[in-house]
Image (cartoon, rainbow, N blue to C red):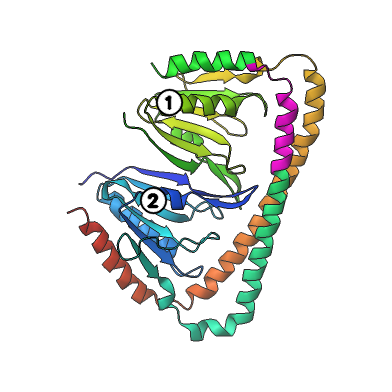
Amino acid sequence: MNKQGLIRYVFVNSHTSQGFHTFIPELIQGIGSVYILKGAPGSGKSTFIRLAGEIMSERGFEVEFWISALDAITPDGVYIPQLDLAVINGSLPESIEPRYPGVRDQLINMGEYLDRDIVMPHRAEIIKLIDGMNTSRQEVYNLLKEAGQVKAEIRRLNSRQLNIGKLEILIQQLGTEILENRPGEKHYFSGAVTADGLVDYVNELSSACQKRYIFQGPSGSGKSTAINELARQARTAGYFLEYYHSGLEAENLVMVIIRNLQIALIEADGVEIPLKPWDVVVDLSSCLDADNNSKLNEGTSIYYRNFESLMLKAQHELEKANQMNKDLKKIYSSAMDFAGLDQLRTKLLEEIQNKET
């Protein structure tokens, strides 16, 4: 393999209204080999993951980077489909442990390369930073829980005007048009609530699709209902689906990609998508009864402002947590034996590369 392999970036973690949520345990369930990296911030986990992905991409392998929910430029994992292999950060807020140690999962303890004599003088500062991060994270979850409740109330108010009959007719028409075969599914986040705000890759992930159905309309107008039902029909028909969940509300879908057909179903609520000539815009406002719409807009505008305020506060808390995480990385990285880590990384990368033969 000489040509550089395709690289794509997806979120598999997010800070949601229900707390931290990750899809990594489900994603690695069917993978043949999993390297689980454990260690403190700054111990070299993300560097190892990035280098593994870049090296394998240069060798022509397709690479899927799983991006951190805290810092949107840091990888928490890399998946190499052709080798049936993943390298992941096991030291997430929701810890990931080996399920089949020594058989499928290989635990890499980066802490073995930490000089505790260098770290111990910073003991009080480390404890303060870790406790501060936990406090900020908890405040983030409290704010996002409230934001999720506000979003649910907006949907509830708008759904009062939803004409179910019109929505069912629209779903039936679209189902006939879209579904004119290996079944299966994968779950990701369409975006994540990060220290940089709500970041998403919806446009990038769907740009290769030959057709995109973009569902527009206010919250509660039936967008997610339509996408869920069309996805159910496609799954029943035996198509392989990629589900992309809301970074705030993990139970809600933002996008479904039917890879066999190169079709994407996208909810455009809060997502910036430059339209292409082959995109089909589906306006679900047509399924709302016109009566009392002006009063409804006045009522929901208050909730929208409250929602935006809560999301900004959550972002501010994540910025604080991210800065404390960076401070922790500086302390721990100063105590790491990176020469020893480089030898370990070289050995493991050779092991990974040998899996192709």
- Quadrant in which the C terminus is drawn: bottom left
- Residue 98: image location, x then y, percent: 40, 63
Residue 315 lies in the magenta-colored region: no
The residue shown at (47%, 78%) is 335
Point out residue 115 in the picture as x, y percentages from the top left corner: 46, 82
Q: Does the magenta run of residues contain 159? A: yes
Disc 1 crowd, CA 10 A, few/some/many (<14, 14-19, 20+): some
Q: CA distance from mark 1 to mark 2?
A: 23 Å
Q: Residue at x 50, y 62 (%)?
A: 95
The residue beneath circle 1 is 234
Please give left or right for residue 209 compared with residue 350 in the image.
right
- The amino acid on which the numbered mark 2 sits, given as a three-letter code, is Gln
Quarter of image, res 342? bottom left
As helix, strand or loop, the secondary structure at mark 2 comes to: loop
Near mark 2 (Cα within 10 A), the count class, few <14, some 14-19 or many ≥20, is few
Give the amino acid at mark 1: Ala
Disc marking residue 29: 2
Extreme residue in the left direction: 357
Report the span colored magenta.
148-164
